Image (cartoon, rainbow, N blue to C red):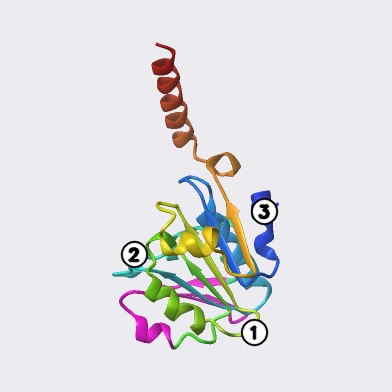
Amino acid sequence: MIQFPKKLEPLFTPSRYKELHGGRGGAKSWGVARALLLKGAKEPLRILCAREFQNSIKDSVLKLLADQVESLGLSHFYDVQTQAIIGINGTTFAFEGLRQNITRIKSYEAVDRVWVEEAQTVSKNSWDILIPTIRAPGSEIWATYNPELDTDETHRRAVVEPFPETLTIEMNYTENPWFPEVLEKERQHYTNALEALVAK
């Protein structure tokens, strides 16, 4: 049985914008990776994985997706290449940086899903170019990020002044079924230290 956070189940229902935010360790990226891989296995999709800055493929989510391909038992379905992931049904995952590749981004108009990782760093200019580019019928724009300021462009669009048809999900470590034991031990240590300090 595939393990999936209950709070992220709405990812499987249509919505033009899907924004996931919260603290580190909340399984946002893992959940999105698994959801997109499962959806891509069910129907052929053209998926663009983007971030504001991507100097090389190592900066992308390709490794995260590759790990999830193996975890989901989909290695027979997806061919993980050095620059892309290809499904036997035609699903494709491509990887781009927004800031450096604006001209190339405009050529991605046939994209069905775009996933913007670390979206708190995405500029207004990048969003203004990306959004009208993703215009195929039923296309969706997904973003995962750790909020920094209410004035950050992504947080403003997702939470402060959300666009119509925006699904906003806040995820924290308590809702992460994969929360690593090493991080839980560190969390408990800091919690106990803080409680001891307050008790003095």
Compared with 22, 188 (above or below) is above
Badge nearest the viewer, 1 or 3: 1
Q: Is residue 179 left or right of residue 120?
A: right
Q: Nearer the viewer, residue 164 or 81?
A: 164
On the image, the x and y values in percent for residue 64 come to 46, 59
Residue 137's label in the rendered image is 1
Question: Mark 3 sits on what residue?
Answer: 2
Mark earlier in primary sequence (3, 2)? 3
Mark 2 lies on a secondary structure that is: helix
Residue 58's label in the rendered image is 2
At x 33% / y 69%, what residue is drawn?
A: 54
At x 44% / y 35%, what residue is drawn?
A: 182
Question: Is residue 80 at all visible to an observer of this figure?
Answer: yes
What range is drawn magenta here? 78-106
Residue 119's label in the rendered image is none
Q: Amino acid at mark 1?
A: Pro
* Magenta stretch holds residue 138: no
Q: Amino acid at mark 3?
A: Ile
Q: Which image quadrant is residue 78 in? A: bottom right
Mark earlier in primary sequence (2, 1)? 2
Compared with 194, 153 (above or below) is below
On the image, the x and y values in percent for residue 32 come to 56, 60
Q: Amino acid at mark 2?
A: Lys
Disc 2 crowd, CA 10 A, few/some/many (<14, 14-19, 20+): few
On the image, the x and y values in percent for residue 47 come to 53, 75
Q: Is residue 180 left or right of residue 190?
A: right
Q: How far separated are the C-alphas under marks 2 and 1?
A: 31 Å
Mark earlier in primary sequence (1, 3)? 3
Question: Is residue 3 at all visible to an observer of this figure?
Answer: no
